Image: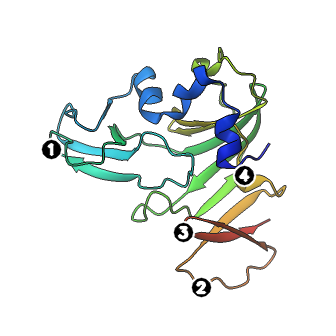
Amino acid sequence: MYLEGNEEWNQIHPHDLWVYNKLILSRILGYKCGPVGTQVPKSDFYIVRPCMNLLGMGRFARIEYIHDNTDNYHPGEFWCELFNGEHISIDYQYQKQKLSVIGTRNEEDPIYKWKKWQKIERDIEFPNILKNLHGNYEWINCEFIGNCLIEVHFRQNPDFRFGNDEAIPVWDNEISNDMKNYQYISDSDYYRKGFWIK
């Protein structure tokens, strides 16, 4: 089920809305994190991003070096420790894994800018934290970095709705030449124009 923002939001049981608040999710999972206005445990690099973002695409997420206080960031944001490892997106249907994809990006690029998403064989158990939700959701998409759950959506991964095995984003500022054995799909979102898929 591929949902637009309003559809996605309106289908969520009110008692499950905490799942979409990445700060609350991170705190429940025991990560080092806090809202703007709290101090970080030590001077270091952290990810700073909106607590809630139904628009997706990593809008306004960035890595910042924080010395101590966070008063200068937007009140709707939070900070969280950084995780290392593969970025995996999993679609679960009634808590059973159905799709696994891995994302790759250049380190120097903004958080939103992915180089490629590709299907992989990877088993990741459905998160325990989501096993007793109030609503009955056919599809739940979870994103992990290094096996740490970082995001949850009550929908499928929309980038693989074409039956594709790969999705290579084409960005607004890029000139894209035809790619042999790939099909171009126009799919505008934020700074993305579409995908080369196969």
What's the amino acid at mark 2?
Ile
Q: Is residue 5 above or below residue 12?
A: below
To which residue does mark 1 refer?
A: 67
Q: Label 2, secondary structure: give it.
A: loop
Sooner in the amino-acid sequence: mark 2 or mark 1: 1
Query: Residue 106 has which mark?
Result: none
The structure residue drawn at horizontal position 48% and vertical position 40%, both measured from the top left corner, is 52
Q: Label 4, secondary structure: give it.
A: helix
Observer-side mark, 3 or 1, equals 3
What's the amino acid at mark 3?
Tyr
Cα–Cα span, label 3 and label 4:
16 Å
To which residue does mark 4 refer?
A: 158
Looking at the image, residue 171 sits to the left or right of residue 197; the answer is left
Residue 182: % across, % down: 79, 73
Looking at the image, residue 76 sits to the left or right of residue 21; the answer is left
Cα–Cα span, label 3 and label 1:
31 Å
Q: Are marks 3 and 1 in contact (CB under 8 Å)?
A: no
Query: Residue 191 has which mark?
Result: 3
What's the amino acid at mark 4?
Pro
Residue 196, by quadrant, is bottom right
Residue 26, by quadrant, is top left
Q: Is residue 37 above or below residue 59?
A: above
What's the amino acid at mark 1?
His
Cα–Cα span, label 3 and label 2:
13 Å
Observer-side mark, 3 or 2, equals 3
The structure residue drawn at horizontal position 70% and vertical position 62%, both measured from the top left corner, is 167
Q: Label 3, secondary structure: give it.
A: loop
Q: Label 1, secondary structure: give it.
A: loop
Q: The N terminus is located in which quarter? A: top right
Rate crowding at label 1 as few (under 14), some (14 to 19) or many (20 or more) other CA atoms within 10 Å: few
